[in-house]
Structures are given as C-alpha cells and as structure tokens.
Image: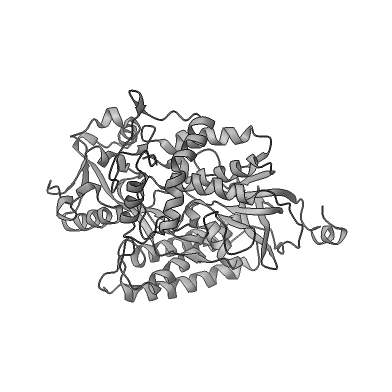
Amino acid sequence: MATQDTATELEDYDDYRETDVLVVGSGIAGLAAALGAAREGSDVTVATKATRPEGASSWWAQGGIAVSRDDPEQFKRDILTASADTADPAAVDVLVDEANDAVRDVLVDTLDVDFDTNGDDYDFGREAAHDEARIMHVDAATGKAIHVPFLNYLDDHDGVTVRDDTAAMDLITHEGRVHGALLEHDGEVAPTFAGATILATGGIGDLYPRSTNPDGSTGDGIAMAALAGADVEDMEYIQFHPTVYTGEDPFLVSEAVRGEGAHLLNAEGERFMPDYHPDAELAPRDVVARAVQKEHEATGEVVLDVSGIDFAGDFPGLVEKCESRGVDWERGIPVGPAEHFLCGGVAVDDRGRASLDRLYAVGECSRTGVHGANRLASTSLLEGLVWGLRAGDDAAGREAEIVEAPELLDRDPALPDNFASEKFVRLRRVMDEYVGLRRHPDDLGRAQAVLRRLKGEVDAYVRTRTSRSLYELRNASVTALLVARAATENTESIGTHNLVESEASAD
C-alpha cells in the first residue's frame, strides 16, 4: 500500500491502481503473457487501447501458426534461411523446441481452437520459404479464430482484469526499475503500479501510408521503452508483405494462397517470379515483395492469379473481401507490397526480459532474435505465444511498489486544428519515400533530419499537455527516428534492409 507521503504525491490523480503484472497490449503475445502469469497465481491487468475485437494485430492474422510437427531441425533451417542466416540460433531453438507443446497446451487443449482438418489429421498448409506443410490454420482467418476465444477465456479468469480502450502514455521508472505505466481511459489519466510490466503493443504500421496493421499501430511500446532507457535492436528490418490488395480499403491476401499454387502475373500476363528466385512465388517475403514492386513499376500492374486453385472453396473469407470491394477475383486480384511486420524492437532475452529491471517485451514490439533480417511466414503468432508464456511465467511473483509517478500535465487534449493529422502525413511521406522497401543511403540521412525536426515540433506540445492522440504521435515520431537511424548505421544490404544506388529525392 502507499505511504502517506506517496499518497500525497499522487493526490493530483483521480485514481491509481496496483497489480502484480501489468500487460500492455491484447494480441496473442499479451494474452499469452497474461495467461502465463495468471497460471502462477499473479494478479494480472491487461491494458489495451484497442476496442474489441479488431484492434489487435493478431485478430487480422490470416495464414496460420507454424509448428515443427515431427521435423524440428528442418523448421529451424527454414527460419534461418528465410532470415538470410541472421536469426539468433539459440532463439530459434527456443521457438521451435516449444512450438508443438505451446500450441497444443494453449490453443488446442485450453481454448479448443477449431483448426482445419483433412481426414484424421490437421490440414497443414505450406507457405513461402517453408520446406514442408506445417501451418495450422482456420480458413484464412486464423488470428480471429485464436484471438476471440483467448480474450473470452481471460475475461472469465479470476486472476485477470482486461481494460479495453486504455492507452499507456509512459512507463513509471525509478532508479533503473520499471514500476508500471501511466494509463489513460476516457480522458482520465492515472498510474497503475506493477511488480512487472510486459509490453505487447504490436507493430508500427501507422508509420507508413500502406500497412496490413490495424489503426493505432504507432510503436507505443518501443517508444516508451526507448525513452525510458531500454535497449532496442534491429529496427531497420521491416518486412513488407508482397500481396496486399492495391485498391480502396486494402486487405492482405494470405501467403497460403500462393502456398496452394496461385501465381503472380504482371500487366502483360507474364508469370515473373521464376526469373527472380528458384522457389518462385514461395521465395522469402523480402524477395517476392521487391520483385512485385519492380514488375509493378515496369508494367503498371501485378495481379495474383488464383484460377488454378480452389480459391472459393479454400478461402471463402478472402472471396468475401474481394466481392465486397467489387474485385473480380477470377480475373486476378491486383496486389502490391505494404508494410507488414517489424522484425526488431525492444531487445529481450529468452524470457522476454528487457534491459531495464522488471520490464518485458513480447510479440512484434520485441526483438527476440528469432527473425533476424526477415521473418519466415506464420512464425509471428508462434513467437507471440511462446515468448508470451515464458515472459508471463517469469514476471509472476512480484508485488507492486508505489513510487513517485510522472508529472501529470494539463489534461486539455486540445491541439491546433489538424496538428496530428498533418504531422502524420509528413511522417508517413518521409518513411515511404526514404525508409521503405528500397533505401538509398544518401536519403537515409535526409530522413533523419526531417524526422528530428518533426519530433522537435511534437515534443514542444508533449511538454505542456497530455492526450492520447498527442502521445501516439510522439511514439510514432520516436519510433520512426529509431528506424531511420538503424537503417543509416547498417551499411549491409540484407533481408528486408535493401540498399540501392542513391537517387535524388525531394524533401
């Protein structure tokens, strides 16, 4: 409990809370962390700025979740090969060795997820850069099939409290230790003190004009951790998914569609992927994305030809998406690359522990070393599940300590008209032009200069007021600058970090 002195220091807040474990984020990584901690008897609070259920990136995951089946060594080789041999072998061992048990324990036995079957066995799918079929899936909506029952299960768990529409503004730190976070809900801001804090805030899609991430993917956990002094790594490695519908209201066309035999055609009707890689459409994502972009620029269009597969029978959800947008999928689905996944993030160990005491990070906001410079398809849900369980288990057993909370600034959220929207337009233009699928070394320095100016403009307002939209903009600008810096410092073109000869670009 708080002492009298501390309670006086907190009197400006309408309320403050205590919990053993605070999880920030409600994707599969955050929910797995909450489950892991609750199983150890800890009181857990899940704070998520998302509203149910579509707000978390996991809900949107299509392809599925990879398992090792009976050949873990081949699975490890596939992960390492897809990463251009930059993944951490020790981290890959953890992921693969625990894959089957984690999926069976949580998704099958605990949540009873109804994975697709084929006779007496699961209908394992194959995706790009996988040597064999090892993807467990539910149609092309695996994320939703996992996420909804997971949230429902934790809602009914006595040891877990889920707070929707609740944003983390800043971490509470004292003498190198993290003691929880300042949370905002419905315009009210108050600290939640925790024995351990687990960041599971997802990706950075809002930094780019086209992304498969849900709205609100502003790099919150990465920015808060970095500002608190935690280490971040591999921020330059951003994966662009090669097959995202290019029209209004874009959507991801699952890698599983190419796994079933769909082909990519340019505007001249030519299948081009065999010219770029011996695995053609099943080459690593970074290779396919660059090829699609090149063919799109050269011929004007790229479509995914699904005429040779049972698209309607195997992917009814994608058929519905096409038809609701007026896409005649039988003639091909227009596709192009879009930002999809950050392979780096808050640097963590094999238990999800960050460099700051009692701070953890799991899922896309973390850098475990599993993905290296490029992620193998359908390993994101698996990484979130495995590291979430390990982090939750490790974080359990600590009680909250009440310390001085960050200063509460003017709560008036008013900003100059269009301030946030104009700054986001500027940020996304810089990231798209300079720090996108292809990067020109000379332009990366220019990107840093523009982003530093933008961050300074945002910081001027952050120093005087507190609002969710402003802090999201701050987090996005911090994270964008981290990406640009990392891209500048890495002079090796590898995986998703693709350096090409410099071209003149306008500021």
- Here the colouring is one colour
Q: Is residue 26 left or right of residue 286?
A: right
Q: Percent from the top left, x then y, of residue 468?
A: 60, 55
Quarter location, residue 224? bottom right
Vertical position of residue 224 compared to residue 40: above or below: below
Q: Specify the quadrant that holds the C terminus.
A: bottom left
Q: Residue at x 59, y 68 (%)?
A: 229
Q: Residue at x 43, y 66 (%)?
A: 483
Q: Percent from the top left, x then y, of residue 459?
A: 58, 69
Nearer the observer, 179 or 166: 179
Q: Is residue 199 left or right of residue 377?
A: right
Q: Is residue 433 left or right of residue 93?
A: left
Nearer the observer, 158 or 9: 158
Q: Percent from the top left, x then y, of residue 20?
A: 70, 48
Name of the residue lying farthest toward the top: 119
Q: Percent from the top left, x then y, of residue 251?
A: 35, 43
Nearer the observer, 125 or 475: 125
Residue 279 in sight from this viewpoint: yes
Q: Residue at x 23, y 30 (%)?
A: 310
